[in-house]
Amino acid sequence: MSRQAKIIEILEEEGFQSVVTLADRLKVNPSTIRREFEKLERMDLIQRTHGGAHPVRQTDTPSLIKESLHHREKQAIGRAMADKVLDGQTILLDSGSTTLEVAKHLDHSRLTVVTNDLRIGLEIANRQSAHLVMIGGELLPNVYTLWGPSSIQQIEHLRVDVAIFGADTVDEQGIFNTSSYELELKRTMRSIAKEAFFVADSSKFGREALFKVFGLDEFTAGLTDDLLDPIRASHFPIPIISVDPERVPR
């Protein structure tokens, strides 16, 4: 995980952090943290204050930073979810860094993949082992997600076997997003699928996000890594499947 990604993770999970505290936690000089703060503020990811910084809420973290957060866990989740996909199915992949890992582990000989994520589309196109259907629309800032009225209209004319969603936050009530941009789009995606799964690393459980996307009754199961407390997982109304990141080849 990059230093910038680690700083973002700490700020999002714990709120304000002083330069001195972060320097001590990350075992670097305070001047290094100040330089990282300057870069992250220019990206509109943090707000600097005297002696420290706050996270900027309700914004989309750039994809390159998201991908470096909990990467081993996301790889394991992606592999496990890809193993559940059957040859010959049509699947829909929601945008996100964990669903991108699902795409990277698809090795089926007959598969149709529908997505609104440019990186997932490129991954599938480069493999040339699946039929790709791209959902068009407008590009969301900082990420590789296409959305908007034209996206929804296109999705409404499709049918898929399985939809696979990411999440900003998961709790016993459902999955949540930090912004409202994609709510209608995601719900339309779910409406065209026979069944759905969500994929989210354990850090997404118990965090706060404003906008509820789905209740858990919309899903067959959720996949996460084995750092999630099994007692907590047992309280969910659907199966929460935990996978071991150490099973992913280095």
Image (spheres, grey):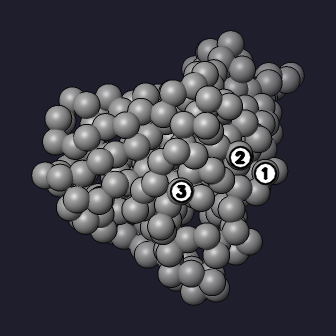
Task: Assign a secondary structure to mark 3.
Answer: loop
Residue at left offset 57%, top offset 25%: 137
Q: Amino acid at mark 3?
A: Ile
State yes or no: discs 1 and 2 in contact (Cβ < 8 Å): yes
State which tag comes first along the sequence, 1 or 3: 3
Residue 73: tell me if it is visible.
no
Residue 226 lies, with reference to residue 53, above or below; the image says below
Mark 1 crowdedness (10 Å alpha carbons): few <14, some 14-19, many ≥20: some
Residue at left offset 60%, top offset 22%: 138
- The residue to which callout 1 is attached is 211
State which tag comes first along the sequence, 3 or 2: 2
State which tag comes first along the sequence, 1 or 2: 2
* Residue 161 placement: quadrant: bottom left
Residue at left offset 18%, top offset 36%: 127
Task: Assign a secondary structure to mark 2.
Answer: helix
Q: Amino acid at mark 1?
A: Phe
* Residue 231 placement: quadrant: bottom right
Residue at left offset 68%, top offset 62%: 214
Q: Amino acid at mark 2?
A: Leu
Residue 116 lies, with reference to residue 201, above or below; the image says above
Disc sitting over residue 192 in the figure: 3
Q: Using the image as rendered, state which of residue 2 and residue 239 is in the foreground.
A: 239
Instruction: Residue at the far front: name it.
Output: 157
Q: How many marks?
A: 3
Q: Nearer the viewer, mark 1 or mark 3?
A: 3
Query: How far across and how far down the image is residue 29, in percent?
Result: 58, 25
Q: Nearer the viewer, mark 1 or mark 2?
A: 2
Mark 3 crowdedness (10 Å alpha carbons): few <14, some 14-19, many ≥20: some
* Residue 204 placement: quadrant: bottom right
Q: CA distance from mark 1 to mark 3?
A: 21 Å
- The residue to which callout 2 is attached is 183
